[in-house]
Structure formats: structure tokens, C-alpha cells
Amino acid sequence: MPDVLAAPTHDDLVVVDKFTGAEIATLPSFTVEQALDALDVTQSATATAAALPRHRRATILEGAAALLRERSESVSQLIVSEAGKTIRQARKEVSRAVNTLLLSAAEARRNAGEVIPFDSFPGDENRLGWYSREPLGLIVAITPYNDALNLVAHKLGPALAGGNAVLLKPAQQTPLTAQLLVDLLYESGLPENVVTVVRGNRHVAQALVRARNVRMVSFTGGFATGQAIAASAGIKKLAMELGGNAPVLVFEDADLDLAIEAAVSGSFWAAGQNCIGAQRILVQRSVFPAFLKEFVAAADSLLSGNPRLDATDVGPMISAQAAETACAKIQEAVADGATLLTGGERNGSVLTPAVLTGVPRTCRLWHEEVFAPIVIVEPFDDERSAIFAANDSDYALQAGVFTSDLNRALRVADAIDAGGVMINDSSDYRLDSMPFGGSKYGSMGREGVRFAYEEMTQPKVVAISRSSTRQ
């Protein structure tokens, strides 16, 4: 996932429509000193956040979900303008964010801890007790642009359910959507200063993650930034999702129509700006020609352009510069021997869906996260070679496998090194309640509401010796 922290140093943050380039808003950026002052204000609210009873935390989150549902169309239109998603994709993101908040509310009510069976060990029969889940305190959350609403909900919902205070630094490209969600939480009764929003460049972010009173940094974004955070954060909890390079394996016994439909969506949803989007589609050689022909035709039929039109399938990327960078990767691969079968035409920030084959494994398109509407389709000969190719990446968030053989599906799922394997679905399927994160080098910890909640709380044990109560 691209770096969400890097930005030019200036006094104002100009937010633009990602399709038209027109200015939407101008917001003040924080200096380092202002950001640290905001952090102190948020720190002062940690006791308030922790003291909120669980039913109150849940009610606030449910209230924000209800308001978000009521205002879903206007919020969707904001996402279209600020993030560049198509209107259909924006509406789906709003519905997912509603679900994320409701899941967080349920977590606040139910996940309070467990009884500990002390009598499971000889000699401890006279003890009883439990552990509770307690807030960490002050959390810094840094979010990306590609899911400007739902990924903010995935930080704030579990954190508030756990009784924490949060300083939120949203992506520079999409601060309005993040602020909208925070405003809904306050409208639903969140106490003052429990969530604070800070806008600023990488120097601001570095100062925040270094602050000693921060108990946890939850970050979704670029790998280089994740490394910088890990190097400077000091002794505190880190949760990071740093991107992927998802493989999708299509075996000769797969339902090809299903595989093509799912893989096209998985490759080009949100203009390919999706960390679990299909990037490398690996197809068994016996069905490769048929798959490739139909896949290219399906990709070529997608409508690119104005994200406000219901018919549009692929909207703009986050910026013209991002689209230009993606074009350069295509050109590099073609220069190294790859064949561009369709797409790759840029008009401002819009890049038409690109399909390549024959991409050398030395190319950036093979071994880096491309984060653009670009996909590689390559043949494989057997199960072993397919698994080897699938695992040929440092990033391993999710993968997809298409086959009608259940035994093969389970074997391949076991052998693929990834945080999740979707059987007969594209790599980009995600339910907001499931554990979400990667294997290998690209992730630390897990999101998904219950799992983020547990990352953002800590167990506290109370043990009672019965002998101490004897008269």
C-alpha cells in the first residue's frame, strides 16, 4: 500500500476531487507542536474513555452507525469526490462501515474477559478468578486513502469499544471522510476529546508515534513508512497492515465463468487500489488460453471514467501522479518482455484496466504491490509450481483458489503462506468480522473487529484464594 504519510510541507491542506481535480476544501495542517498539544488533549480524555460503561460505548457506536445509514447517500457522494471510488463502490463502503461500527458495539458488550480455571492445576483448587479486558489508554491511528471511511471505522470502532482514547491521523488525500465519521461519533454522545483528528505531514506523524505516552500505534499504509514507525516508536504496541501482492490460482477443474467474473472484480475494484486485490492470476496451462481470452474481453468491457455514473466500473486513481507511476511500471514490464493485452491508457487520474502476460519475475509488477488497475495473468503446469509462484512474494495478505476438488483446495490453502485463502473466490473477499492481516513481512497483528479489539485492550487478572476468606 502506498505511503500515506509523505506530503509537502505547507500551512494548508488542499483537498481535491479525484476525477475533476477541482478543489473541495482547504484545511489547516498541524505543526509538530500543535499535533503534540492535540496528543496531550487526547491523553487527558483517557480516564473519561475508560470510565464509560460498556453499554454506553455500545450505544455511541450504534448511534453513529444509525446516523451513517441515514446519511448514506451524501456520505457516498463525499467518498466519490474525495477518494475517487465509483458511486456503487462508495455505497458498499458505507454499508460496510455501518456493519463495522455495529460489530464494535457488540464487542463492547460481550468481550469483557473470561473466568480462569485455576483448579486445572494440582494445588490450586482453592483459587478462583478471572481476567478482564482493560483499555490500553492512548492510541494513535494512522489511516490510508483507499477505504477512507471503513478503514477509519476499523480503527476507531474497536478502540472505543475497548475504552481507549484515539488520536486519528487520516490520509492527507481523504481527511474529510475521516472527520465526518468522527463528527458522527460526537453527535452520538462521545465525550469531548476522546477522539482527536490531526492533519499533517510525515514530520507530524513521526512526532506522534515517538511520543512516550502513546500506548499503541495502529497503522495501515506503505511499507517504507511502516519501517520508519517501527524504528522510531519505542516500547509500545504496534499493529500494521503494510500491503499485499495477492495471487489467485485457477485450476483446470475450476468453474471458469465464476473464476473470470470474480477475478475481474478482484483485480479492478476501486481502480485496483486494494491491498487484497488480485495482482497475479495463475492459471493451469490446459485452460490458460480459454481463461485469458475471456478475462481480457471482460476487462476490456469495463467502463472507466466518471465515478458519479452508476454505469462506471473503474473510476480515477487517487491522483494523476499515481496513475503516471502505474503506467511507468507497465512500460518497464513491456520493455523487459511482457505483453500488454489490453488497457493501460491514462487520462489524467484515470487508468484503464490493464492485463499483462509474460511478465518476468524480476519486474516490479511481479514482486511489488502495484496498487493500480493492473493485473498479471500467467500459466502454470502443476500444483507444486502454482504454489511456488503464489508464495514468490514478501507480502502475503490473502490469496484466492478456484477448483472443484475439495482435497486440492484444502492442500493448496495449507501450502499458501498468507493471512487468508479464499476458496472459489477472489483474493479480495473480506468480511469485517474475520481476522485480517498478513503473513511474512507485510503485517503485524490482526484487524477485524474482534481481533483489533483484543489488540487494543490488555488482560488484567484477579485471583482469589479461598483460604484467605476463612473465619
Image (cartoon, rainbow, N blue to C red):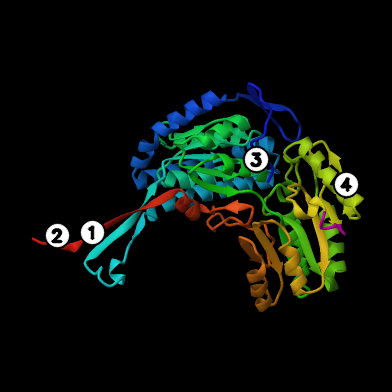
Quarter residue 293 falls in: bottom right
Q: In this rendering, which labeled residue sits more in front, label 3 or label 1? A: 1
Q: Please give the label number shown on residue 469.
A: 2
Q: Which residue is mark 3?
A: 145
- Residue 359 among magenta residues: yes
In the drawing, what numbered circle is on residue 239? none
Q: Is residue 205 above or below residue 89?
A: above
The dot on residue 464 is: 1
Amino acid tagged 1: Ile
Are the two marked residues, 1 and 4, in contact with CB atoms closer than 8 angstroms? Answer: no
Residue position for label 4: 331
The amino acid at mark 4 is Gln
- Which secondary structure type mostly characterizes the magenta part of the structure? loop
Q: Sort mark 2 into few (<14), some (14-19) or many (20+) by Cα contacts within 10 Å.
A: few
Q: Secondary structure at mark 2?
A: helix
Q: Are marks 4 and 3 in contact (CB under 8 Å)?
A: no
